Each structure stands twice: as structure tokens, then as C-alpha cells.
Amino acid sequence: MAKQALAFSVLALSVLVALAGCTNQMDAPAKPPSAASDPGPDFTTPVKADWNVDVDLVGAPVAKDGVVVSYVTGAEGGLDIVVWNASTGVELWRDAALAGNGSSDISVDAHIVQTEGRTVVPYIRDLAGDETGWQDVVVADAVTGAPIALDQPSGWVTQRPGECADGTGVCFSGIPINGQNADNTSFRVDLTAGTVGRDQDVALPTNSRLLGSRVYSTFDRAPDGVEMLGFSARGKAAWEVPYTDVFGENYTSDDGWAWQDRGADGLVVGRGTIWDASIDMSADYSYERADSHIVALDPVDGTTKWDLADVGDCTAAQLRQPFAGEIIPACRVNSGVVHVVVASDGSVADTTDEDVDVDLVGINRATGDIEWSTPVGGDGSLFNWRLAGFASNIATRPINVNGHVQIIDVLTGKGNAAPEKGVFACRKMRATAELPYYSEANQPYYIGDNVFPCDINTDSLDASVFSPQALLMGGVDAGDRYYVVGGASGLSGFRLPATG
């Protein structure tokens, strides 16, 4: 397992940056508001759960058009996909599912896609009557669960189906069942025609895998080959460059990645990390925390527009939709060493950070300039996803700044002191789940985080009671003021009180 693999649930985390000489723009703690002013975020009013279903969630729930979708642990330890009514928690339908044959270090998250006037749930399941590992791609009506008839749904799926790179349709990658010696290919589903064909937008070249919507890397490795980084559009590869030419010597996608290639400015932005081949990962080892880069590439020819070094992912800078705006929230790592404890089976048992010093920064996506910077010190939960930490799906979130919790907007850098008696949203990584993988019986999969209400010290509180702001931060918006939360006690639905 790569040394940082569990931190990289692709496209689910932000990438982070380093650059010197920036001023701290965080505001001083605000004065108490007057009766006529905006009361600010409500961390105190209790909001009790309307419903709860006792399930073992796998991945993060998603919601749209009044339904909630998530994978759960099924019968005999398998995987099911389940859909519930967002306002009542009533189960609408479920089906047996598979995680697929992609990376087991990427969170097994469900998808809802709106396309061709329909709301659908795409997933994969075992090919009936087959015992050799082939799968069926299923695209089901989100409300009824009725599958849409497809002409060639079977194959060896390497990337689970979801929304296509152009924001329309359902796409996936894999090998068709009638082409056992074929290469990994990108496919697009035409729901109206009921056909599965090669994606005429994203063309996945031979011997490669997708790292983003359009960014890919080849499987070639030294000493016999060179890993290439490429970009696909309009049915062909726009460019390919050696991976190390982009990031530097010893960098490889094998140690994790995070790419976003849908920005309005057209730039392809991503993060890479070093793979130190000299490290013996069968025993405990250590490495420098600041061993990664964030880069912006030209989608036309792959030339580097800007490159920032000494960066790393951190929980404080996560956004549910990374790079959605002009500012990329990030962490600049000034110092720090990671110590990794290796279990007897070779897996990572634990990680700890030593002498960590970090600045939270906001990067101008177009230029790479640091727009704001705030020193946050070395809170242990910044990098260790195994520890409990604050959760937020929105730009505003609690952040431990040198031992004092601040409510900071990570797009502007502005913030205020957090209320001492508030109810916040926290998260903690779930234990891995044993799921079928390739021809092996089972493989440990990363299955996301549990979210729970917590106090300012990140200690857990009554799981059935959040505050309005904690729901905005840690919940999933299901529409009509309903928010759903996936935690250790299952899936819960809350309704925010009406305002105004």
C-alpha cells in the first residue's frame, strides 16, 4: 500500500500548496452582534433526527431529487446499494453491488446522475451465472430501481460508473466481455438508445488509467519504461508528458493523486507525491511530510503554468467539490516527519506526525499566487485521517489554529473565534471493509468516514442531535431543508428549522 494512499480518495480531497511571503488575513474575533445584526452561524439550537436507519454504511451518501443513495454492508459481508426517501428514511429499493476492480484506496462512494431528463443510479453487480469475475453495469431509475435495458452491459470494470467528464451522461472504464484481450477503455451509456459504446470524448489510451475526469497515467515504470501523464479530449489524447517532467524525480501516481480538470479557466490542476523506492515498506518507516507538489497545466499542450512545492493534503482544506471556484484552499507544510507503523500483514497500522508546522493558504487557481495565509501549527488531525477531526462540506469550517478553534472561510481566509459551547460536526475514518477485488477473495477497501456531532474538543455528543450549522457543515443536502448524515449509528435524516 502506498505510504499516503488512505489520504487520497481521488477527487474527494483538495490539494495543497507552499509559497512564502504572504500576510495573515484572518480577522480578529468579532464582537457580539447587536439585536438588529446577522446573528451568524447557529451552533447551539438543537436539531433532532427525524429518522434513522440502522445500516453499516460504505462510502459517503449522496442525495438528489428527494432520494438518498449509499452503499452498505450486505448479506454475508457483501456490498449492497440502497436508496431511501430523504424525508422519511423509508427504503425504496436495494440491489447487490460490487466495488469493481479499480484502486481499493479510493472511497467506495455511490453516484446519482441527472441526464437525458432522468435521475439515475449507476453501479455494477455480478454477471449472472458467471464465476470468473465479470460484472454487469446497471443504470437504474433512482426512485423505482428499475434498470434501463442496455445492449452490452457486461465487462471487467476498472472505474465505477458515474457522471461523464462533460457533465452529461453515464460513463465508466473497463474491458468489454467480448474483448478479453482488449485494453482498458472509456465507455459512455446512451440511456435513450439503450447502448454502451466507446466514449467519443474521453479516449483512454492503451495501458493506462484515469486519474481525473480527463487526466490519465500509463502503467509503464522504470527501468523498462516511463510513466506518462496525459490528457484526453474530443476522442483522443491531447498530449502526453513524462510524469517526472511534471512533478520531479521519483514522483509517481502510485503514491496517490488528486486532479481537477473541469475548472472554468480550463487549467488542469493536480497534486503529486514522491515514491521513495529505497524505503522498506515491510517494516516501520518514516518520510518527510512536505514531499509533494501542486501544478497547473495547459490542457492544450500540457505545459506547466505554475508549480508550487512542499505541499500536502490536509483535513482543514478539504472541499466536497474541490477547485470549484477561483481559490484552492491548501496547506503549506513548513516542516514535519511522518512515522508509519506497519502491521504484520504489511498494511499500515498507524501513522503519527512529528514536529509539524503548517500554514493554511488560499491559492489563486489561475495564477498560482497565494492570496491569503494563516499559520495553524501542527494539530494532529490535519494529516492523520484516522484521528477524529472537524468535518465540513462547505467553505466555512472549524479549524484548530495553534490550540484555539477558529471558524474560518477557507476561500477567503477570514474567520472568528468558535463558540466554546457549540455543537460541531466531526468525522473519523471507518475501519476498512473486506470486499471482492480482482481474482482475490477479498481486499481491504477504504470506505470513507463516519460523521457525528461533537464539542469544541472533537469529543462525540448525542448522535441524534446536531446544531443547524453542524448539519450545514457535516450533512448532505437532500433538498427542502433535509440533511442526511452517515455515522456509526447508520444513516440519519434531519430537517433544518425554517428561517425568516
Image (cartoon, helix red, strand yellow):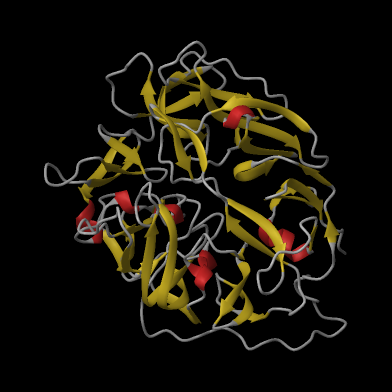
Q: Quadrant of residue 175?
A: top left
Q: Is residue 469 above or below residue 93?
A: below
Q: Is residue 437 above or below residue 247?
A: above
Q: Which quadrant does the C terminus fall into?
A: bottom right
Between 239 and 384, the one nearer to me in the picture: 384
Coordinates of residue 480 in the picture (x, y in percent):
80, 48
Look at the image and tell me whether residue 393 can be seen: no
Residue at the image position 27 percent from the left and 52 percent from the top: 252
Residue at the image position 53 percent from the left and 24 percent from the top: 125
Between 224 and 497, the one nearer to me in the picture: 224
Q: Quadrant of residue 187?
A: top left
Residue at the image position 52 percent from the left and 75 percent from the top: 379
Between 475 and 367, the one nearer to me in the picture: 475
Residue 282 horizontal side relative to residue 385, left or right: left
Coordinates of residue 231 in the picture (x, y in percent):
31, 44
Coordinates of residue 75 in the picture (x, y in percent):
63, 28
Look at the image and tell me whether residue 16 can be seen: yes
Q: Residue furthest left?
A: 224
Q: Is residue 151 above or below residue 169?
A: above
Q: Residue furthest top?
A: 129
Coordinates of residue 90 in the picture (x, y in percent):
80, 34
